[in-house]
Image (cartoon, coloured by chain):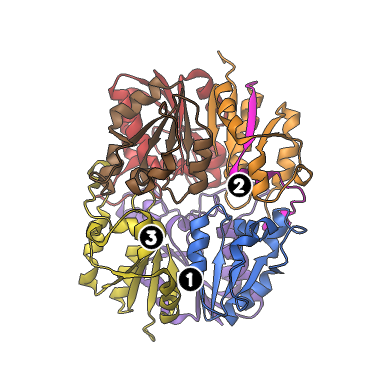
Chain colours: A purple, B red, C brown, D blue, E yellow, F orange
Amino acid sequence: MKFSLVVHSSPISQQSAATAFRFAKTALEAGHEIFRVFYYGDGVLVANSQIAPPQDEINLPEMWQALAKQYDIDLVVCIAAAVKRGVLDDNEAKRYEKDAANLAAGFELSGLGQLAEAIALSDRVITFGA
Amino acid sequence: MKFSLVVHSSPISQQSAATAFRFAKTALEAGHEIFRVFYYGDGVLVANSQIAPPQDEINLPEMWQALAKQYDIDLVVCIAAAVKRGVLDDNEAKRYEKDAANLAAGFELSGLGQLAEAIALSDRVITFGA
Amino acid sequence: MTLHLLNKSPQSMSLYSNMLASLSDNDSILLIEDGAYGALSAHNKIFKSLPDTVSLFVLRADTEARGLSERVSALFEVIDDNQFVELTCQNVKVVSWY
Amino acid sequence: MTLHLLNKSPQSMSLYSNMLASLSDNDSILLIEDGAYGALSAHNKIFKSLPDTVSLFVLRADTEARGLSERVSALFEVIDDNQFVELTCQNVKVVSWY
Amino acid sequence: MSDKKSILIINQSAPYGSNKARESLDVALTCAIFEMPVSLLFIGDGVLQLLNGQQPEALQTKKHEAMLTALPMYDIDCLYVTSSDLKQHGLQSEDLAVPVKIVEQKQIASLIQQHDTVLTY
Amino acid sequence: MSDKKSILIINQSAPYGSNKARESLDVALTCAIFEMPVSLLFIGDGVLQLLNGQQPEALQTKKHEAMLTALPMYDIDCLYVTSSDLKQHGLQSEDLAVPVKIVEQKQIASLIQQHDTVLTY
C-alpha cells in the first residue's frame, strides 16, 4: 500500500506529531511504502535545524531524518507555512535577507502542489492534526 | 498599574498572540507599565529571527521589538521552551553545537524564575493562551 | 472581584461550564477572539442562570472581525481595547479560560 | 468503508458528535492519543446508539501511557500500531477528527 | 498527475481564532488548480466562516469572507453546510456571505462516500 | 523577591496529548522554589493527569504520574480535584496516583478568591 501522511502538529507541543512518526515506521517495517510526508501548519517546525530537544526526550527531527534515509521517503515542508514560522532553506534565507538557512538536512521546502500530488498518487492519505 | 503578560500562543497559528500585543500597546498608551512579557510554550516562536511573515500580514516579532524599544519592556523568552523549539541565543547555540544564534534582537532567553518574579512584582498577570 | 477572559466558541462547552462554576458575585466575563461567538443571541442560555451582579462584556475588535457587530445579544456590553485594559485594573485578578 | 481516527477526549463533545454523524455502516472508529479516554466505560453512552456494523478500536500505546490498560470498556478492541496500519489498509479512506 | 481524485474538505474551525480555516482554503485552491474536484463541507464552528459582514481590520489580518467569495473563480462551487449547525448559532441562509447548499446532518456520510479523499481542518 | 504571592494553578488538560500538563507542573515547581505558596486545582480533563498506572514508555516521554508524586518534595501538597469531574470519567479516589482533596464544584470560586494569582493550563 502506498501512503502519504500530512502532519499538522508541532513536534514539541502535541503528541500527534509523534503518532505520525510511529505510524510511518510501523507501515514501512510492514513492507508498505510512504510516498511522502507533507508537513503543514505548525508541523513544519520539525524541520528547524536549531531544535535541541532535551537528551532524555523524543527527538522527532532526528528520527524522521534517519527513517527517510533508511527508506528513501520524501519529507516535504510547506514553504509558505515554513517561511512564516522561520524555517528557511538557502534560497529563502537569501530572499528574505536572513543570515543563514536553518532547514534541517533531509527535509525539502516546497509548495502545496506537493500535497495535491501526494493525494493524487497515494492509496491512502492520513492526516495527523492537533 | 504594573502588568505582566504571559503569552502561550504561536504568533503565526493563533490570534491570541496578537491580542496580547494589542493589550500591551493599549495599556502602555494609557500610561500603565508593562513590567515583563514572558513567552512560554509555542509563544516563544515570536523570538525566532528567521521568521519572514508575508508583507501584507501582521508581523508580531517586529511589532514587539518596536514596542519594547519605545517603552523599555522586558521581553523574556522561556529558555527551556525556546531551546526545544529551535530558538537559540549565542550561548545556547554554542552549547548545542548549532551554527548560529537565531534569537531576535530585543528578546532575552531566561528561566521560569523570571515568570515567578513577574508574578511577585506585578499588580496583574494576564495569560494569553490557545 | 475577578475578570474572566474566555477565548473559545461555545463549542468548548466544558470550558464554559468550568468558567461558570468559578464565578463569584461581582465578577466580570469578557469574551475575546473566538469567544465572541458566545455573544450571539442563540447562546444566551449559557449565561441565563448567572446572578445580576455578574457583568458580561465582549471585545469590539473580535465582534467586528467575525461579522457579529449587528448580532450581539443585549446581555453583553461591547467594549474596546481601552475598556479591556480598564477592566483588568478594576478587577483584582484575571483568570484566562482558553 | 471509512476509518475514523479521533484524538481528543470526550470533552470535545462536538467533535464526537460530528464524527458520529459522519458514520456509514461498516465504518470503523479508532481512538488515539487523548481520544483513548473515550474508551473509559463512563463514556460508553457516546457509542451506545451505533449500529453493530461499526467497529470500535483504541490504540494500545495510548491506553497504556494514560493508565487505561485495566479500564478500557468492553465495547473497544485494543490494537497495536501494526493493527492500526492494517486498519488503514482495510478501509478505503481515513478521516481524521482532531 | 495520473489521477483526478475528488476531495472533500471538512471545515470545523471558526475563522480568525486560529489559522486552520485559512489553511483549508489554501489547500482547496491548490487542489482546484491541479484540476481535482473539490467540495467544502462546513460543520460545527466551521459554519461561522460563512458569516457575512466580517471586518477584521483591527486584527490586521485577511478577510476570510473575501477568500470564500473568490472560490468560484477557481471552480470551487460545491459548498455544503448542515442546517443543524446553522441553527445552533441562530443563523439562516441570509446571514451567509456566499451561496451554499444546506444539507441535513445525515447527508455527511454520503458526502464522505462520494469523494475519494477527505481532509479535515 | 519583595512579596510572597500565593498561586492557584488550574489544570484543565489531559496529559500526553499536549504538553500543557507538563508546562503547568514546571511553573508550579518554579514558583515553589521561589517560596511562593502553590495550590493545584484539577478540573475537567485535568483530573486525568492524576490517574494511576501510567506507562508511557511507547511514547518515549516522561511519566506524568512520576512528576506529580514529586510535588510534595517541593512543598506542594495542596492538590484539589472536583468530585463532579472525577465522576464524569467514572473515577474514584482509589484510581488516583497521589493524595488529593476532593472538593465540590462550587468551591472553585473560593479557591480563586483565596489566592493572589491564578494561572490556567
- Residue ID at (28%, 40%): C61
Determine the CA span between mark 1 and mark 2: 25 Å
Left-right relation of F33 to E102 = right
Q: Which span of residues is magenta-colored?
A: F35-59
* Circle 1 or circle 2, nearest the eye: 1
Which amino acid type is marked by label 1? Ser
**Secondary structure beneath disc 3?**
helix
- Residue ID at (45%, 37%): C49
Q: Numbered disc 1: what chain?
A: D
Which amino acid type is marked by label 3? Asp
Give the crowd class for mark 1: few <14, some 14-19, many >=20 residues within 10 Å. many
**Secondary structure beneath disc 2?**
helix
Give the crowd class for mark 2: few <14, some 14-19, many >=20 residues within 10 Å. many
* Circle 2 or circle 3, nearest the eye: 3
Q: Is residue E21 visible?
A: no
Q: Was residue F25 drawn as part of the magenta stretch in this picture?
A: no
Identify residue for label 2.
Answer: F45
**Secondary structure beneath disc 1?**
loop
Q: Numbered disc 3: what chain?
A: E
- Kindly indicate whether the residues beneath marks 1 and 2 are on one polypeptide chain: no
Q: Which quarter of the image is occupied by the N terminus of chain B?
A: top left
Pinpoint residue B81: horizontal percent, then vertical percent: 54, 41
